[in-house]
Structures are given as C-alpha cells and as structure tokens.
Amino acid sequence: MAASAGVSDELWDEFHTVVNMTSRELQEWLRAEDAGEETEELPDRAGKRTGRRVLEILGKRRTDLTDDDARVIERVCDVVRSQRPPELDPKSGGADWRHGLMDIGHDPLKPVR
C-alpha cells in the first residue's frame, strides 16, 4: 500500500496521547489476554486485530503510514474519546471497560502525559 499523508498533526498527536501504553506493554497485554489453559496464540497473532494494528503503527514513521493506518488511528482516537471523557475518574469503569481500552493501547489507570 502507498504511504498516506492523511494524518493531521492534531490526529497524530492525539493518537500518541491516547495510546499511553508502550509497544512492549501493549504486546505483553495482548499476549496475556490471548493466553489460555489449552492454547496460546503465536506472538504476532495475539490479541484483537485493532490492538495488533496499533502495535504496527507504533513501529512506523509517520511518513510510512497507509490509508488503512490512518483509519485505525481515527478509530482508536474515537473509541478512547467516547469511552474515556476527561471528567471520568479512571477508577469508575469496571475491569471489562479497562481491558477493552487496553486492547487498543489505552490504560485508563495510567497518568495522562
């Protein structure tokens, strides 16, 4: 796929703010989430697809982003914005809520940078 210039400075900055887990933290989280008693996914297939895409995007330079990457960035920012309004206490959501956000790289219990 060709590189995209479709990610504004604001969206790029927002993505790197809402995705507050490091690549390593996200990768470990995705692996732990997929580990089961009977089976465990291969490391590059662990976790939800969007979480794996976030990991890929974190490993890219902005100039190497594709149109699909831009759509993932927009979706992740929209999800975090809608599920984590600024006035929401990070401890007010349940474990499923937190884990759902962590699946895309946002840990609501981490301090905002």
Image (cartoon, grey):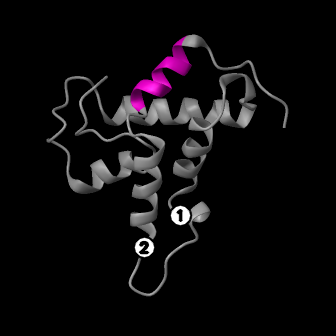
Three-letter amino acid code of the residue under disc 2: Ala
Q: Eyeballing the image, is 36 above or below 19?
A: below
Give the residue displayed 74% in from the left and 31% down from the top: 67
Give the residue displayed 52% in from the left and 13% down from the top: 10
Residue, far front: 24
Q: Which residues are magenta?
A: 10-18
Rendered location of residue 99, percent (x, y): 32, 53
Q: Eyeballing the image, is 37 above or below 68?
A: below
Give the residue displayed 33% in from the left and 36% down from the top: 83
Quarter containing the N terminus: top right
How many C-alpha atoms fall within 10 Å of the one at disc 2: few (<14), some, or many (≥20)? some
Residue, far top: 9
17 part of magenta stretch: yes
Residue on which the image places disc 1: 46
Residue on which the image places disc 2: 35
- Which secondary structure, mark 1? loop
Nearest to N terminus: mark 1 or mark 2 = 2
Q: Is residue 101 left or right of residue 98?
A: right
Give the residue displayed 73% in from the left and 22% down from the top: 63
Three-letter amino acid code of the residue under disc 1: Ala
Principal SS element in the magenta part?
helix
Rendered location of residue 42, percent (x, y): 58, 70
- Which secondary structure, mark 2? loop
34 part of magenta stretch: no
Q: Eyeballing the image, is 84 above or below 14?
A: below
Q: Eyeballing the image, is 15 above or below 55?
A: above
Q: Is residue 20 left or right of residue 94?
A: right
How many C-alpha atoms fall within 10 Å of the one at disc 1: few (<14), some, or many (≥20)? many
Quarter containing the C terminus: top left
Q: Are marks 1 and 2 in contact (CB under 8 Å)?
A: yes
